[in-house]
Image (tube, coloured by chain):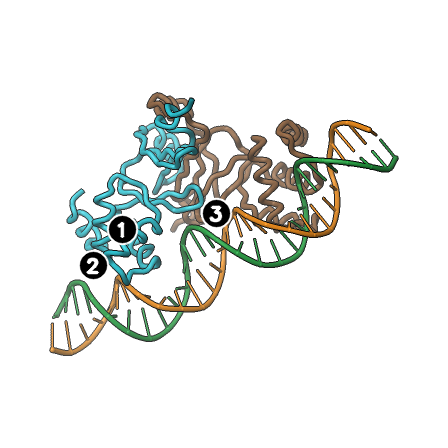
Chain colours: A cyan, B brown, C orange, D green
Amino acid sequence: MDRNYYIDSLKKSNFKITPQRLTVIDYVRSHSPGHFTAEEIFNSIKSEEPTITLATVYNILKALQSSGTVKTFETSGSTWFETNTDFHGNFVCSNCGKIYDIGIDEEGILSNVEGSGYSVQEANLILKGICKECLLDRD
Amino acid sequence: MDRNYYIDSLKKSNFKITPQRLTVIDYVRSHSPGHFTAEEIFNSIKSEEPTITLATVYNILKALQSSGTVKTFETSGSTWFETNTDFHGNFVCSNCGKIYDIGIDEEGILSNVEGSGYSVQEANLILKGICKECLLDRD
DNA sequence: AATTTGTTTATAGTAACTATAAATTCAAAA
DNA sequence: TTTTGAATTTATAGTTACTATAAACAAATT
């Protein structure tokens, strides 16, 4: 997604554009699709944005999330942020820790749930196991 | 599930049977199927088990999990424990906070993921939205 | 350029665990 | 049934991941 998609989404939700927000946007864009913790982003951008604090990174991620350009999920004791806002599974490798996006058919799941009378705002499928690479690396 | 299912599962995994463990087992059994945090269980049983600490409750839940009688998932900043070990979705109501089990077809999802070469150990589908009851309560 | 309101920063605080080590207890074997 | 050794519990301290607060600052509308 191009930079203006993030900027315009923030503006549409009445958020202001700040240099700190642009730095975070540039970070997630250049690592997209990916999975980030607030701390990871903070550590990566603090050389470029030396006065930024972790609290600001959390605030920015909340703004991006509420403007619809990033999604979150919780696993392994942390909140993870990602730019892939399409429905998909997140596979966490118990061996190497990497997180992979896995395409999943949304229809089958949601029709089931909404058919039972629930109104779904958000869905997260979190999978744990051993990833392809780690399976191959085994003796 | 009857008490012996939990006890035998612990024994099979080489865990010892302690009064504290039996108290937690009785708690989750009498609230099953349900969704609990360690703190909730701790608060509910401390009158019955006055010397127990929160650390012990965490330890017991870890033992139950590793012996296969409880599952966990993370959402809303906490780890939740549940006795429903069959594959299902957990629907969290953004309005009332209640968590509901939702039947989901496991096959469709897992065939997809394992077909891509991943070995799945655990799967959690977490849904957020407004539950039936809260939708009806709206003006 | 002035004003308003949102944002950032620094800092302190909290919630949800996790680690550690001594005391205790389970349960297998003598 | 006592002994023994390992697991468990307990008390306590520590850590990690966030959240709250208030003052300083900056964006963007007029």
Q: Which residue is found at the position 57% from the left and 39% from the top? A: B62
Disc 3 marks a residue whose amino acid type is: Ser
Residue bearing mark 2: A19
Q: CA distance from mark 1 to mark 2?
A: 14 Å
Specify whether A69 is left or right of D1: left
Q: CA distance from mark 3 to mark 2?
A: 33 Å
Residue A124 in sight from this viewpoint: yes
Residue bearing mark 3: B78
Q: Chain of mark 2?
A: A
Disc 1 marks a residue whose amino acid type is: Leu
**Label 1, residues with CA under 10 Å away: few <14, some 14-19, many ≥20:** many
Depth check, front residue: B70 or D6:
D6
Secondary structure, mark 2, is helix
Residue A4 vertical position relative to residue A126 in the rendered view, above or below: below
Which of the 4 image quarters holds residue A86?
A: top left
Mark 3 vs mark 2: tell me if same chain.
no
**Label 2, residues with CA under 10 Å away: few <14, some 14-19, many ≥20:** few
**Label 3, residues with CA under 10 Å away: few <14, some 14-19, many ≥20:** some
Q: Chain of mark 1?
A: A
Q: CA distance from mark 3 to mark 1?
A: 23 Å
Q: Chain of mark 3?
A: B
Q: Which residue is found at the position 32% from the left and 45% from the top? A: A36
Depth check, front residue: A45 or B18:
A45
Mark 3 vs mark 1: tell me if same chain.
no
Q: Which residue is found at the position 44% from the left and 45% from the top? A: A77
Mark 1 vs mark 2: tell me if same chain.
yes
Horizontal and vertical percent position of residue A135: 39, 25
Residue A47 - label = none
Horizontal and vertical percent position of residue A72: 34, 44
Horizontal and vertical percent position of residue A73: 37, 43
Residue bearing mark 1: A64
Depth check, front residue: A35 or B72:
A35
